[in-house]
Image (tube, rainbow, N blue to C red):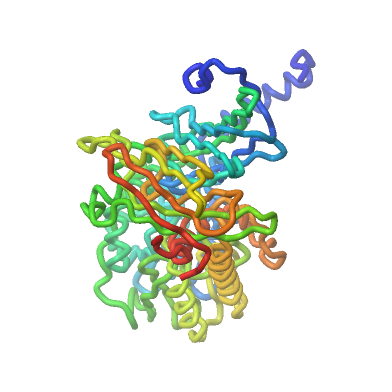
Amino acid sequence: MKTSNPSLRLFAGAALLACTAANAPDYALKPQRIADGVFWFEGVDEHFTRSNGGNIANTGFIVGRDGVVVIDTGPSKLYGQQMRAQIDKASGGKPIAEVLITHAHPDHFLGNQAFAGAPIEALPATVTTITQQGETLSANLYRLVGAWMQGTEVRAPTPLAQTGERSIAGRRLRLIALTGHTESDLVVFDEASGTLFAGDLVFFHRAATTPNADIAHWLASLDQLQKIDFRQLVPGHGPIVHGPEAIAETRAYLSWLRDSLKQAAANGLDMVEVMNAPIPERFRKLAVVDEEHTRSVSHLYPKLEIEALPPAK
Amino acid sequence: MAQRYLSGAPVTMDDRVRVLMPQSAEDPLAVPVEVRAEGLADVVEVLVFADLNPLPKILEYFPKAAKPNLQFRFKVEQSTPVRAAMKTRDGVWHVGGAWVSAAGGGCTAPSVGTGSGLWREQLGEVNGRLWPQKDGSERLRLRVMHPMDTGLAAGIPVFHIESLSLRDAGGKELALFKPYEPISENPMLSFDLESKGPITVSGRDIQGNLISGRIGASPL
């Protein structure tokens, strides 16, 4: 590259200025209204990067008569703070009645600091995992997204005392304990609007992540979600849907993943060969499918491949 | 690295030596790697090392009646290049490699087996199976139960498998595999052997515990 070209140098200088001006990271969160009093923040369909600051998951909130119920707090303290500022604006400054954490993955709970003072609750196994592995998960996110994480510290939720029908801040909610994406996955259903916050049990237009998955349990949980008479579903990642298509897409991808890995083990393939095997055309449209497929082979293959190897004599 | 591991022999970087692995290590305790030669004949020795690991040398492999291809998993301490050097009969090392990004910490963690104390009961147990291939070779997949402790975790001495010899039914040695500290706990390995019929595995660890097993083509 010729650096002596004056226009290029000028361009480089302008870029440097732009970088300096954009130094303070900003998630530019905008709540989108789903129904009366129900909002969500949409994450991007990407992996953790230094440009997206880890904002890859959807979060949401429900404004009740006496306060606000928050569902997940995002990947960092800054995200939590910016989310809370938007919630305060949308609710007219109502108190935070309760923060519900759907599961123990870092893009969903590392904004908890911004909600200090409010009850932050999760299913018991989620609390245990965050207590035991939160620091590791947080350190890894610092490595992946950098300065956006500044000041972020793990704040473990307290165990949810009660699931099922609950009235919180004057709003009737159904809190449903499921499993499969992780050991414990909390789903929140708002009765009045028919909105289902499905957490990471449902992905839409994006490949599912599996670091703590049990696919058989996950598929059974999808059957449970299918039975709920929702008017709209907020997946953990990807756009909102009104019909069964997101559940169906997640089910199809997970079923293919399970079957293809079993077949590969029966055929004597090793892990890298499985990672490099082609992905069927019908899943090519899912965001980050190559990366997630590679990760899923790491997560799921060790258990399946040994089932294909009998003891030596 | 060349001086230390390739003993002053001539070295050439060679695209025919392929190191295939994910760009990012999902599990720093078990990064899967496939090493293969594409169009490079007469390979007598394969050496794999990770430049930036505290213990760089991962394995040595001597294919006698086998392809120079093999697959294994290793423990990674930080992001590093992983290189395979293949020595051809004329004494030249052919080197290829790839880069893996990692959060790391894999080398300085105790093995799960040592941590739980359960390793003694299963030490040296072998699972495996053969898959005849269309080109007349056979794929051997093998798992040997062993903690493979690196010696870098506080209070846990180095303890790893020293050698595994693969022989056909007539006793002819097809290949010799020598793993070092970075190979993952309970090594899961794949080899492509030029043989037919059952394989005998025999070997030992650095404390002299013997490993042996006979492996056929039948599923469970």
Residue for point 58% across, 49% down: B192
Say if A171 sits above or below B36 in the image: below
**Which picture quadrant has residue B134?**
bottom right
Regarding residue B136, the answer to whether it shows in the image is: yes
Name the spot of residue A89 as percent of width and height, x first. 46, 58
Q: Which is more toward the observer, B66 or A115?
A: B66
Name the spot of residue A195 as percent of width and height, x first. 50, 77
Residue for point 60% across, 66% down: A239
Compared across the picture, whether A179 is left or right of A264 comes to: left
Name the spot of residue B204 as percent of width and height, x first. 34, 42
Name the spot of residue A71 as percent of width and height, x first. 41, 65
Say if A76 sits above or below B182 in the image: below
Residue for point 53% across, 68% down: A262
Marks counted in the figure total 0
**Which picture quadrant has residue B39?**
top right
Say if B93 sits above or below A60 in the image: above
Regarding residue A88, the answer to whether it shows in the image is: no
